[in-house]
Amino acid sequence: MKDYSDYINYSRKIYDVYMSMSVLNWDMETHMPKNGNKFRAQQLSTLAKIAYDLETDNNYANLLEQLSADNSLDNDQKRNIYLSNKKFVKRKKYSGEFIQRQSNLISTAFKDWRIAKEKNDFNLFRQSLEEIVKLRKEETELLGYSNHPYDALLDKYEPNLTTKDVDLIFKDVKDHLVPFISKITESNHIDDSFFYQKFDKQKQWDFGIELLKQMGYDFDSGRQDISAHPFSSHFSPEDARVTTRIDENNLSDMIWSCIHEGGHALYEQGILCENYGTPLGNSISLGIHESQSRLWENHVGRSLPYWKNNYNRLQSFFPEKLKNIDYKIFYKACNNVKSSLIRTNADELTYHLHVLIRYEIEKGLIEGSIQVDELPSKWNSLYKKYLDIDVPSDSMGVLQDIHWSHGSFGYFPTYTIGSFYAAQFYNQASNEISNIESKIEKGDTEELLKWLREKIHKHGQRYDAKDLCKKITGEELNFKYFMNYAKNKYSKIYDIR
Amino acid sequence: MKDYSDYINYSRKIYDVYMSMSVLNWDMETHMPKNGNKFRAQQLSTLAKIAYDLETDNNYANLLEQLSADNSLDNDQKRNIYLSNKKFVKRKKYSGEFIQRQSNLISTAFKDWRIAKEKNDFNLFRQSLEEIVKLRKEETELLGYSNHPYDALLDKYEPNLTTKDVDLIFKDVKDHLVPFISKITESNHIDDSFFYQKFDKQKQWDFGIELLKQMGYDFDSGRQDISAHPFSSHFSPEDARVTTRIDENNLSDMIWSCIHEGGHALYEQGILCENYGTPLGNSISLGIHESQSRLWENHVGRSLPYWKNNYNRLQSFFPEKLKNIDYKIFYKACNNVKSSLIRTNADELTYHLHVLIRYEIEKGLIEGSIQVDELPSKWNSLYKKYLDIDVPSDSMGVLQDIHWSHGSFGYFPTYTIGSFYAAQFYNQASNEISNIESKIEKGDTEELLKWLREKIHKHGQRYDAKDLCKKITGEELNFKYFMNYAKNKYSKIYDIR
């Protein structure tokens, strides 16, 4: 007779393998010498297969089944068993053959995408992408769905999120955000050219470290490194790392990537160690994760009180470059709204139009209403439609994101969901924390972090995202909080009545 | 019916897990934030258990048995099967219970040792060490041996090396090296005080990188980092890394640790990728590994031609500090022979007396002629006997090395074996490579590296250490090559006739 502690040990074992993979991945993106790639890919694939075998082992299934019927468990224990069982059922739907095929396909697709992007030729990626779309369609059938096949893919990243939900969210975006963006872009132009001077890399780095410390990021349980694309990564709550990228000719790149990744890492550092290796020791969903990074990046890090506090310090790093800029000008410049080509460089409002475009394309590809060979023209016409911008090349257009080459479909919407959760959570935090703005103005975000820890981080997967949101804010995800935030902030910045 | 390719895949899978552990270990020693320890140890223990389960799987045993009888295999294939089978048999001798007990014990012992060393109190480590010695004695019975129980432990690090071999080697050391060292220490004193000025860390680092490049270390397949104790580590021949330590008040620490670890890493970079994950894709033994590091460190890196070539460059980094020192003085100073307390700081001659002391103690502990509680006094009297030096504290005496706290018994002798192999190999290389000294004088070690690659690196475990040595030099390990090298070199340095 096995018991709950056997489940804990086994679940931790699986998680240890995943965390080991994270270390290998982190190293690959930060420090690995260039020839290390081939064997690293093989090592990762071996660990993935080992994890898969552990996750789909029949003895584990029996243990989960037995514990599912064990009424002596407390609610947290039941929740762990419920979620592990759900995951088991899902993992079992994949055959080893599918996993292997997927792994090979992604490896090829990633190479093809890199070359296609470099050579600005979508055709070099087309065939791989067609195979990937086919694979994903197969996956939707294999996983099952009740309404739209895309639901099955959304659920992988944001459990219980449906195409219907996302359609409603983007309807709001189109109905309310798009006209508001038009108002902004028709109004005054903001000059943010001072961001694009030459800023010493070491000084940028030092300032970024200060911002991370100020947020409450614990460098005894994390570290920052440089990578081609900023990311956060964790191996336990006591080792949750961030990376950043420093462009000598663009100050903004480093600042908000630090704050953004710091937000992700604070979530991981706030997970309870005692729950390591179980669903309660894991973050809920990509959307909730993104809510943490966006809350810090935008609601805190692009706010007036934040820069009222931090701008002097930034200026002391770059007295010459910033001598004619005061914190109010700086604040406006870092909230410059304008249509742009590249999603990762977009401001916090037009950003969602980039996501909308990807969502419409992914949904179309999966339901079969869009074909892969139409993608460049489809992409370009959607950029014209939503952002009123001409795409000069596939490299800066349909080939800009890594996601599809990694086989990720259903991922993009979590960026938008996350931002809207952020607005709703931040609004609630502002209601519950007295004088939050004047605290931020003093560099004091301790209470905010404590609130996030208490309301979100410490629970792990105790609640589904939707339930968590209701529990914290009294209602499900509601676009109005983001829209109110946007209107309130940008009406002032752009002097819109 | 399974075939050789199934063996290859399975063997690589096991190796992938070990290489993943190496990545986790490397990260732990170089970059991991301080709180990361607890879960990292757990992750490593999980991977170790997974590797053990794979290595001792019955299906694998059957496959090896079947392939052992397969006459269609070529010699390399037969060698791989032979060695994998040997390893399987050895691994099978351990119970899961033993492995678990060992892991717990080492974890405790390591903590106790650190505290004992810090507090300079051997008693805080005594109990753990007693348990470890007991465990190792148990292991010798479990592994089996024909003459001396210590043989079973030596064999773990240097296959086929016996206590009898090591006794003979240290008899030579005592008969020939000890009197020669006496002659040296009775002769002129060398002033090496200029090493202990303040040398800028970044400049030291830059110089070390140059030395590594000059040796032929490939930074596209490796990198250097800082760690508390220098080490080399590899995840494949295409990712073989080194670390160094930089003491701002001691120039020598960095220089020869770079060259030493570089020598280890060149061995790993010279292993053939096609043999990855099989015995032929693995180094032979710790002794042969150490022969590579010592050959570069001492025979190349402490030679007169080496510094005739490199000294100007070093001087250009530190013109003020080294202005009154010419390359001949520098050469003498870096070959200063004198009794010292700490093994890792010892010169290349007295070094072997440090090893001898550890060997005598280990052998005594395992055969039962020495008890753990006698260790401090035993240690101190041996340091008096062989090095004529008084040990002021246990921290600088019996507690100085990490090895015993890691449970490593039988490891120390490989340092000496390796140095003697190095002398014998280097002597042979000098015979086969024309004008090797004048090549080194020009910074050209390409031919030497090619020779090492051809004679040693590329073979992996194709030959046992003893056979390899015979194949390369025409005879088994012979102390006279080291002694000749020492006499020849130090008679000149110390003007001894």
Image (cartoon, coloured by chain):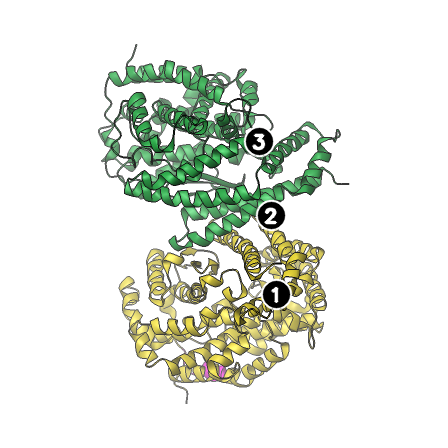
Chain colours: A green, B yellow
Q: Kindly identify which chain the residue marked by label 3 belongs to.
A: A
Task: Confirm whether the magenta stretch covers residue B353.
Answer: no
Viewer-closest of A252 and A218: A252
Tell me the mark number nearer the camera, choosing from 3 and 1: 1
- The one of A417 and B4 positioned closer to us in this rendering: B4
Q: Give yes or no for contact between labels 3 and 1 (Cβ–Cβ under 8 Å).
A: no
In the rendered view, tell whether residue A106 sits above or below residue B276: above
The quadrant the N terminus of chain A occupies is: top right
Look at mark 2 in the image and give the residue it sits on: B42
Badge 1: residue crowd in 10 Å (few <14, some 14–19, many ≥20): many
As helix, strand or loop, the secondary structure at mark 1 comes to: helix
* Marks 3 and 2 belong to one chain: no
What is the CA distance from the residue labelled 2 to the residue labelled 1? 36 Å
Residue B1 in percent (x, y) is at 62, 58
**Amino acid found under the numbered disc labelled 1:** Leu
* Image position of A340 (left or right of A43): left
Q: Nearer the viewer, residue B27 or A34?
A: A34
Q: Type of residue at label 3? A: Gly
**Callout 2: chain:** B
Mark 2 / mark 1, whichever is N-terminal: 2
> Which chain hosts label 1?
B
Do marks 2 and 1 share a chain?
yes
The part of the chain drawn in magenta is B180-189
Q: Give the residue drawn at x 33%, y 35%.
A: A253
Q: Is residue A329 visible?
A: yes
Can you tell which mark lies on residue A460? Answer: 3
Q: Which amino acid type is marked by label 2?
A: Gln
Q: Secondary structure at mark 2?
A: helix
